[in-house]
Amino acid sequence: MSTDPVVVSGMALHTPLSDELMGNLAAVMAGRSAITAWRSIDTSRIYAKIGGDLGDVDLNPALTELTARLPPGIGARLGRLARRLPHMPLLGLLTVARAVLDAGLEEAEAAEAHVLIAGANLSDRLMDDGFARFAATRSGIEASHELYLLDSTLAACVSELLGSRGPAFVINGACASGNLALLAGLRELRHHGAKRVIVLGAPSDVSPRGLHGFALLGALAIHHHQDEPARASRPWDRDREGFVPAHGCGVMVLEPRSLCVARGARAWAELCGVGVTSDANHLTMPNEEGQARAISLALQRGGVAVEELDFVSAHATSTPAGDLVELAALRAALGPHAERVRINAPKSMLGHTLNASAVVEGVLAVLQMNADTVHGSLNIDHLDPGVDLDVCASGPARQPVRALLNNAFGFGGHNTTSVFRRSA
Amino acid sequence: MVITGVGMITPLGDDVDAVLDRMIAGEGGIGRFMNLAQTPHGAAIGGDLSAYNVTGRVAALRALVPKDVGERLSRLVRRSPWSVGLTLLVALDAAQRAGLFERPVPAQDLAVIGAGNNLGARYGEEGFGRFVKEPDYIDALQAVHMLDTNHAASVSELLGAKGALFTVGAACASGNLGLRAAVDELRDGAAAAVVVAPVYDYAATTLEALGAMGATTESRDAAHASRPFDAARDGFVPAHGAAAVIIEPLDGALARGATPLAELRAVEASSDACHRPPKPDPEEQARLFLRALARGGHGVAELDLVSAHAASTPAGDLAEGQALARALGDEAARVLVNAPKGALGHAGSAASLIQLGLLVAQLRRGLTHGTANLSAPDPRVPLQFADAGPRSLTLALNNAFGLAGLNCVSVVRRWDGEV
């Protein structure tokens, strides 16, 4: 088993705010929200009306630009794949391509990557469209329908893009999927001899029915601020109501530091460890003990002392119960040091990117660490009186960050935290 | 790593030894799906569990487990979608057989790993029908119930497991991939892992889509349609099936007084780097077989039995047969091959975990099952196919290849009681 530290040697991010790393960083520092009324989803029959929408973005300019900049074999395969793939998987693939460029991978280096897709049930809209066509006509199901319905096909497509014959699979635990993929990435490097790993926090192509399911659960912000979408996601605000779903995707390239250095590539950060626990409860109640245990496990596995932490990118989804439970878990796991870390809520601007969230927010957190600045938590007009930690309510702040936590908790009692450290 | 418990539910029964006995007796489990209407292009036949006696099984298992676990089982089965109910039953069966209630591991060191993706198509199809009529008619817990990972999360609640919890998927290679993830989890400190591969809950639209793809059989002859490696095969027969396996480090298993059933020697994965057309790659498969054996510290000369993926598709069986012939070399005349999908049909993401359970039973009992309907082997596949009957068996390979070129194989060895 290798003990070489694992570094993040490439990143990419596509959210409604930007399809570039620095564009996203600048937007969240400026307090811009990604949330609008849904344009690409027909919300006429459902309560959910707002979200972060990438369903109607034209991917052709990016495709042209990336195809030209990528190593020729990868560029050619991207062009071929683009003619086949539905919109959201293609958006994921383009984001992988950006990460390949950011990491500076040559053709042969990309071909050594193992491929991990964070997420499951990614193509609800494709599935529901198929049900609708078939129910109406008893036909209309094309030969490739099942192929593109399967989440695992996205893993196969990323492998094809990279020309990699390494392991490729999906890993998920609801909204904690991203951190689970980062854990699996560490294991590919440490236990399976991978030279590098591509982790794609995959975009969720949510359907009207899927959105309605969240609404019926009482999990969404559907009553207040609907005419001011940018104000609806408001973690730790007194008047928060629920989460706001969003499209978005992120990619991390993981690599042993020695290989990253040998290629002359930049290490954005060290991925120290990931903690994963279960609450033994398949429903949706956040649990302080399980979250605290995940945080402690991540720190212990990562060999990071509590005192090294300067920053927590919180899961904080803007739900009445969850946002405070998370702070209690941080206090339980970090002790008095919890009062000395900056805690912010990326979902206050990005909304909840679901399966992708822990990768999307992990990328954003690493960008903040490299910028010695943390973004603010948007929309805290009246801080919940139950908040007794620094949740960046007053906007961005200069903050040198030695190490950070990236929290993600999912339906079904999935608790996860990843720990990153400034790369030596 | 050792396997200490196996549970399965298949159209041939819900006890692994009984399933093996029925396969050895030449019985088949294919009929038709009682919960799905015929579609224009969809398979007319299937391995059905929709009429499986869930309440009877709940009662039988409740007699074997602690009272609180039994109560949780009843409550969870009652409130969950049908396929999650089967997941709970099969996981509880495996845990009970592994003695996890009499001789438990610490709750926070017990991991639960789901294996499979896009599992709930029929649940989704029914829900969509309700949504079209009136959005508020859908299951109020749809947002939980439609997630693949709800299967593993429900098992974690049932067993009170508080260690790692996640779900992996690689289409029809998912079962083996779950084993691979479990081994990693144990290496990183878990005391035991439950790997559960739920029923792939085919929807009518799924059957239509698989038919439109040309993947499934056009035969209506249920007893003879699934014929792996046979010259007259024409596509796979979809089937329900679920399995669960308990894995733990040998020393931990012995320390808590559990009985190892078999050793999991290695699990290796790869991909074909080509998602379309879905065309299995015999060279990649052959490399993977050899790598898996080597990772387990073995060579082809030690291998006794291969449980083939062979789903009865023209291209897939041929590619696998060629890959095996290539990897086995001269040993191809000695190493036995069988394909359980002849009797059981193709249980999708659960298939390779069902196969693993059957391999554990075959190794333990020194018996092989044959391959149903293999009457005229494809002449392009020069392999030694196993008949049903007693054998001396030590080492076996378990193959799984998923749609779009996702491969994962496991290597399992008879437990001989020697440390």
Image (cartoon, grey):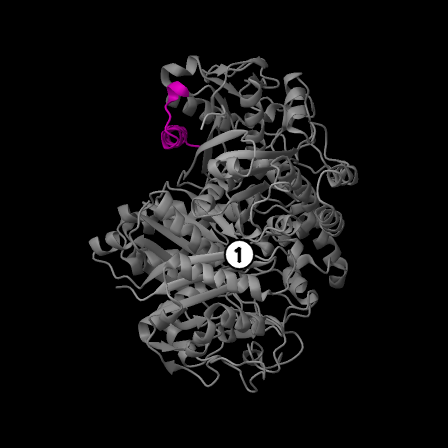
Secondary structure mainly formed by the magenta segment? helix
Residue B291, visible in the rendered structure: yes
Q: Is mark 1 on a helix, strand or loop?
A: strand
Rendering coords of residue A186 (x, y %): 38, 51
Residue A31 lies in the magenta stretch: no
Q: Which of A364 and B137 is in front in this view?
A: A364
Q: Name the residue under label 1.
A: A277
Residue B300 lies in the magenta stretch: yes
Identify which residue is drawn at 75% across, 49% down.
B71
Image position of B393 with respect to B402: above or below: above
Rendering coords of residue B218 (x, y %): 64, 28
Q: Would you say B117 lies left or right of B202 here?
A: left
Q: Which amino acid does label 1 sit on?
A: Thr
Residue A9, image quadrant = bottom left
Chain of residue at mark 1:
A
Identify which residue is drawn at 56% across, 76% down.
A233
Image position of A181 with respect to A307: above or below: above
Q: Which of B257 and B287 is in front in this view?
A: B257
Residue B219, image quadrant = top right
Rendering coords of residue A87 (x, y %): 49, 57
Residue A81, visible in the rendered structure: no
Q: What is the crowding at mark 1: few (fewer than 14 residues within 10 Å), some, or many (at least 20)?
A: many
Image position of A409 with respect to B191: above or below: below
Identify which residue is drawn at 47% across, 72% down.
A335
Q: What stretch is highlighted in magenta?
A: B278-302
Rendering coords of residue A207 (x, y %): 61, 60
For the image, the number of numbered tags is 1
